[in-house]
Structures are given as structure tokens and as C-alpha cells.
């Protein structure tokens, strides 16, 4: 069965896309980031929670604050990427549920009164949104370099001192530079991951 999405778009989003390790110095504009968000905000989350928050590091000072918490191998590419986004989840996402899920106003208190419930749901649903965000970056004709090699406690303290947001990953964004991509690594086949009962 053929997919509805045309093959060129499939290639752009999946088959030809790679994690970028170098970038050109071409800026990533606010308009591009807005367009990416305006597309990916429609990706589903449970109860329409939408807990993902984006912190865009444009200034050299903000970038330097992050670099002190990055793993050594991630420092050079993070220093030179045109834009770096710190993706986090908001522990107080439930406060927006009456607005985002208006047909069930009791959800906020029934499911998310306890912070431990919000922490699990927030991390899971923001991770879904992070995947959408990476696809949105690719849809904009840009490359993404997502990373989890950093000190989460250090990043949380540096950027989210009040503790109400928790970092998930850091994503470098831009046009790919020279030797940006490693060779494609193998993927698991359908039969390796699908069980039919």
C-alpha cells in the first residue's frame, strides 16, 4: 500500500534526514521557528496537554551558559550551530488544561493534582512533541542535531531555576555544513519490532 505523503516529502522527513553535526553560519530566523511551531503544535498529546517548552539560545552569552553543561563531544557543534533549542517540559502544564481540553474541565484536578502524575505525563508527552519538533525542523528544510549528552541537573539549574521546567534534550538547528552527516546506521526491520496477536 502506498503512503499518502509524496516520496520527496518522505525523503525529506525520514529517509534522507540525518542528525547534523556541523552547520553553516546561515541564521535560523524567528519566522522559521514560528512556522515550525505553528505546524507541529497540531501533533497529538494525551488530553491535549502540550507540556513542551522551547528555550531558544540566540545570544553568545546564553550559549556559553549551556556549553558548561554539555558533554565534551557536543560542545563544538553546539558552539557553532546557528540556533540551539533547549527542550523541556512544564510541570505546571495542567494549569492550561481548562483552556486546551475545555470539554472535560475536571481533567486538571482528577488526573494531575499530584506533581508525580504531572512529572510522568509531562515527560512522556513532551517527548512526543520533541519528535514532532524535529520533524518540523526537517519540514522547514533545516537540519536538526538532537542531543542528550549533557548534565540535566546543571541545565535545569542554569535555565529553569524555579524547578517548574525539566530539560529533555538539546537540539542544534540550521543548514547542514560540510561533513554534517555520518553514514546511515542500520535500522530494525518490520519483523524485528512488530508482534501480531
Image (tube, grey):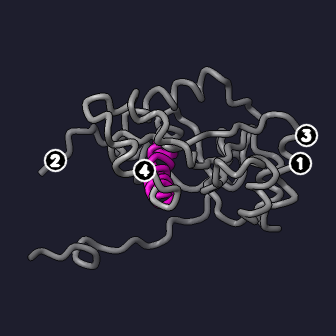
Q: Which mark is residue 112?
A: 4
Mark 3, other Cα within 10 Å: few <14 / some 14–19 / many ≥20: few
From the image, state whether disc 2 or disc 4 is nearer to you: 4
In this view, the residue in front, 108 or 31, is 108
Judge whether residue 129 is colored magenta: yes
Mark 2, other Cα within 10 Å: few <14 / some 14–19 / many ≥20: few
Instruction: Describe the element under mark 2 as helix, strand or loop.
Output: loop
- Precedes in sequence: disc 1 or disc 2: 2
- Precedes in sequence: disc 4 or disc 1: 1
- Precedes in sequence: disc 3 or disc 2: 2
Q: Position of residue 117 (x, y in %)?
A: 45, 59
Q: CA distance from mark 3 to mark 2?
A: 48 Å
Q: CA distance from mark 4 to mark 1?
A: 36 Å
- Using residue 76 as the reference point, say whether residue 27 is left or right of it: left
Q: Which mark is residue 2?
A: 2
Q: Is residue 8 visible?
A: no
Q: Which mark is residue 61?
A: 3
Q: CA distance from mark 4 to mark 3?
A: 36 Å
**Residue depicted at 33% across the width and 43% down the height:** 107
From the image, state whether disc 4 or disc 3 is nearer to you: 4
- Precedes in sequence: disc 2 or disc 4: 2
Is there CB contact under 8 Å for labels 3 and 1? yes
Instruction: Describe the element under mark 1 as helix, strand or loop.
Output: helix
- Using residue 190 as the reference point, say whether residue 160 is left or right of it: right
Mark 4, other Cα within 10 Å: few <14 / some 14–19 / many ≥20: many
Q: Which residue in the protein does label 1 denote?
A: 64
Q: Position of residue 126 (x, y in %)?
A: 49, 50
Tally of numbered tags: 4
Judge whether residue 55 is colored magenta: no
| Stretch in magenta | 118-135
Amino acid at each position: 500500500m502506498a503512503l499518502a505523503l509524496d516520496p520527496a516529502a518522505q525523503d525529506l522527513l525520514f529517509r534522507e534526514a540525518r542528525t547534523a553535526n556541523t552547520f553553516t553560519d546561515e541564521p535560523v530566523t524567528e519566522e522559521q521557528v514560528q512556522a515550525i511551531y505553528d505546524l507541529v503544535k497540531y501533533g497529538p498529546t494525551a488530553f491535549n496537554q502540550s507540556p513542551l517548552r522551547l528555550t531558544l539560545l540566540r545570544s553568545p552569552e546564553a550559549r556559553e551558559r549551556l556549553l558548561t553543561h554539555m558533554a565534551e563531544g557536543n560542545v563544538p557543534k553546539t558552539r557553532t550551530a546557528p540556533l540551539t533549542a533547549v527542550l523541556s517540559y512544564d510541570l505546571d502544564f495542567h494549569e492550561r488544561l481548562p483552556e486546551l481540553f475545555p470539554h472535560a474541565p475536571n481533567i486538571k484536578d482528577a488526573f494531575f493534582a499530584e506533581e508525580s502524575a504531572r512529572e510522568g505525563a509531562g515527560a512522556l508527552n513532551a517527548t512526543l512533541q520533541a519528535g514532532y519538533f524535529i520533524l518540523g525542523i526537517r519540514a522547514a528544510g533545516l537540519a536538526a542535531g538532537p542531543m542528550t549528552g549533557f548534565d540535566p541537573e546543571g541545565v535545569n539549574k542554569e535555565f529553569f531555576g524555579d524547578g517548574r521546567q525539566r530539560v529533555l534534550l538539546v537540539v542544534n538547528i540550521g543548514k547542514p555544513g560540510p561533513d554534517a552527516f555520518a553514514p546511515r546506521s542500520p535500522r530494525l526491520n518490520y519483523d524485528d519490532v512488530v508482534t501480531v496477536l
